[in-house]
């Protein structure tokens, strides 16, 4: 998606440790016009799939998932990273390791929001090591629902996550795949 790649080059900041800061438009301050175009592109790429719900993980995926859901006309469910008093009753749980935060989270979704008849599209901002995506896929499987695919805004193609997730059988559509990046030479995208 050229619009997204151009924005990453213009406003993204490469940091040591394979960190790409896109917080000025994607995951801290959000450019809703750009999100609209991202949502349209996910709808185009998954137009061959029936989607009944979009699933994401807190926090950065929520805004993107909500805008995308408008184009699918479906609700958004997000996995919480902490147990709260608001989640009562039965839950699906999994573990995910955050590349950015360098820690493992327990993720939780109330069973009432994931049903066997659901056709789930996962939406997230980044794909690096694949842990979040595989954790979300596990929740879908535990619910007996169908996982129709995963829409990723930015994939770090030089990390193993995309390959691992695709080899597990998940259809992954990434809008921008980065083959390499560093502070000196910048960002190289996959065509």
Image (cartoon, rainbow, N blue to C red):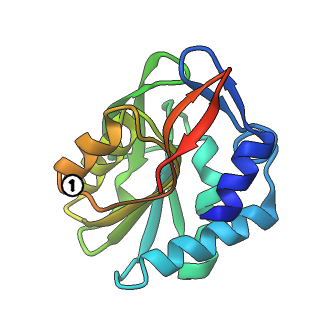
Would you identify the image quadrant in which residue 96 lies? top left
Left or right of 66? Residue 74 is: left
Please report the residue visible at 40 percent of the width from the left and 33 percent of the height from the top. Answer: 158
Left or right of 185? Residue 79 is: left
- The foreground one among 122 and 37 is 37
Would you identify the image quadrant in which residue 88 lies? top left
Left or right of 110? Residue 86 is: right
Quarter of the rendering occupied by the N terminus: bottom right
Please report the residue visible at 70 percent of the width from the left and 42 percent of the height from the top. Answer: 27
Q: Is residue 74 visible?
A: no
What is the x, y in percent for residue 28? 76, 39
Q: Is residue 43 visible?
A: yes
What is the x, y in percent for residue 184? 68, 21
**27 up-or-down from 143: above or below:** above
- The foreground one among 70 and 39 is 39
Q: Secondary structure at mark 1?
A: helix
Few, some or many C-alpha atoms within 10 Å of disc 1 (few <14, some 14-19, many ≥20)? Answer: some
What is the x, y in percent for residue 77? 50, 58
Left or right of 19? Residue 57 is: left
Q: How many marks?
A: 1
Q: Which residue is mark 1?
A: 141
Query: Most extreme residue toward the front, as rendered?
Result: 185
Please report the residue visible at 63 percent of the width from the left and 77 percent of the height from the top. Answer: 70
**150 up-or-down from 29: above or below:** below
- The foreground one among 27 and 139 is 27
What is the x, y in percent for residue 190? 47, 50
Please report the residue visible at 78 percent of the width from the left and 47 percent of the height from the top. Answer: 25
**113 up-or-down from 97: above or below:** below
- The foreground one among 52 and 112 is 52
């Amino acid at each position: 998606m050229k619009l997204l790649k151009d924005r990453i080059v213009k406003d993204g900041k490469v940091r040591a440790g394979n960190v790409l800061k896109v917080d000025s438009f994607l995951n801290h301050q959000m450019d809703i016009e750009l999100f609209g175009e991202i949502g349209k592109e996910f709808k185009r790429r998954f137009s061959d799939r029936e989607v009944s719900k979009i699933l994401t993980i807190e926090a950065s995926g929520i805004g993107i998932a909500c805008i995308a859901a408008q184009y699918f006309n479906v609700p958004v469910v997000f996995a919480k990273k902490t147990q709260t008093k608001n989640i009562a009753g039965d839950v699906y749980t999994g573990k995910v390791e955050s590349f950015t935060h360098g820690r493992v989270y327990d993720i939780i979704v109330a069973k009432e929001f994931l049903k066997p008849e659901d056709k789930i599209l996962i939406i997230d901002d980044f794909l690096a090591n694949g842990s979040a995506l595989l954790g979300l896929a596990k929740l879908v499987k535990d619910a007996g629902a169908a996982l129709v695919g995963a829409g990723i805004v930015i994939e770090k193609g030089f990390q193993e996550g995309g390959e691992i997730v695709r080899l597990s059988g998940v259809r992954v559509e990434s809008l921008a795949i980065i083959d390499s990046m560093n502070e000196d030479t910048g960002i190289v995208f996959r065509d």
